[in-house]
Image (cartoon, rainbow, N blue to C red):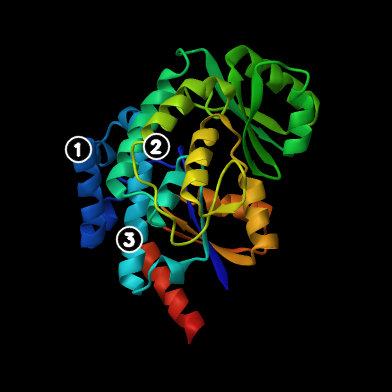
Amino acid sequence: MTQLLVFPGQGSQTLGMGRELADVYPAAKEVFSEVDEALGQHLTKIMWGDDLDALTDTANAQPAIMAVSIASFRVLEQQSGKLIRALGGYAAGHSLGEYSALCAAGTLTLADTARLLRIRGNAMQAAAPKGFGAMAAVLGLDAAKVAATLAAIKNVAIANDNSPGQVVISGTAAAVEEAGIALKAAGAKRVIALPVSAPFHSPYMQPAADAMHTALEKVELKQPHIPVLCNVTAEPTIAPNALLDNLVAQVCGTVRWRETLLNAATQHGVTAQLELGNGKVLAGLAKQTVPEMKSNSIGTPKDVDAYLEHSAAVAA
């Protein structure tokens, strides 16, 4: 069985995430402490506090989501006694989750990953004036149909191709509204405005892409222990220079998640997915895209125990 390790992106954050892991496993507590130190901030106080707006702030949400993913991963390594090569043949992360994947695979240190995501969050937030941009989830149409509809509308693009029936669009607020009307007329079941303050994964994020290029050139990227399927190519990559270029490109580019899962399954023999981090969003997308792919999620001590018990039963 070849397994794909996947790491969630923005929107998966919830108050209290990761706290049970830190309470039970020293390995998880060390991850959160290292992230706090790298940022010079008690991010965990926000994560485990009661201010959802503070956690949802892009500059906090991105490193926080990554921290829970890496804590889950480190706990799994420790509790299973297996390193990443024995846990998965490939890795992938949704948007900011690509940084989590690269951290788990040894390309980036945890401290560098936290600092890069803080820069990324701030840069993405600052790239467009508040109220200028918008994003919306389109349900019931595939990416090809959405793209064909958007061809007649300026200032809007596909941000995420998540699954056969879920596509996210991004652009100016007026263009996204116009696109929503056209997409409903083209057969979309629903077009849902997303609670974001900027047009992420669109050409309007170019200032943020430039900022990430500068920031990434200042850190060392090592060859990953396992290939990482990148958002903008949907293909596995191990070359550090290519990984850097892809991280820069994904700020403005489409997250090709549907193609990532399909390529993993059809071209690289992946038969199972293991989601590491808060929530089970990626498990749902896998079910829609590759129904036969087995999927598990780890983000709590209960998840860890269930996965290890299942793995032991399969091995026996």
Q: Where is residue 223 shown, x and y percent of the image?
A: 44, 55
- Residue at left offset 59%, top offset 33%: 253
Q: Nearer the viewer, mark 3 or mark 2?
A: 2
Amino acid marked by disc 1: His
Callout 1: helix, strand or loop?
loop
Residue 118 lies in quadrant: top left
Callout 3: helix, strand or loop?
helix
Left or right, residue 3 beside residue 190? left
Question: Is the N terminus in the top left, top right, bottom left or bottom right quadrant?
Answer: bottom right
Question: Which residue does the numbered mark 3 point to in the structure image?
Answer: 74
Contact, mark 1 vs mark 3 (Cβ under 8 Å): no
Distance from the alpha carbon under mark 1 to that under mark 3: 20 Å
Question: Which residue does the numbered mark 2 point to in the structure image?
Answer: 216
109 and 10: which is toward the camera: 109
Q: Nearer the viewer, mark 1 or mark 3?
A: 3
Rendered view: 241 above or below 51: below
Distance from the alpha carbon under mark 3 to that under mark 2: 24 Å
Question: Which residue does the numbered mark 1 point to in the structure image?
Answer: 42
| Circle nearer the N terminus (3, 2) | 3
Q: Where is residue 162 shown, x and y percent of the image?
A: 62, 43
Asked whether residue 18 is in view, the answer is yes
Distance from the alpha carbon under mark 1 to that under mark 2: 24 Å
Rendered view: 23 above or below 133: below
| Circle nearer the N terminus (1, 2) | 1
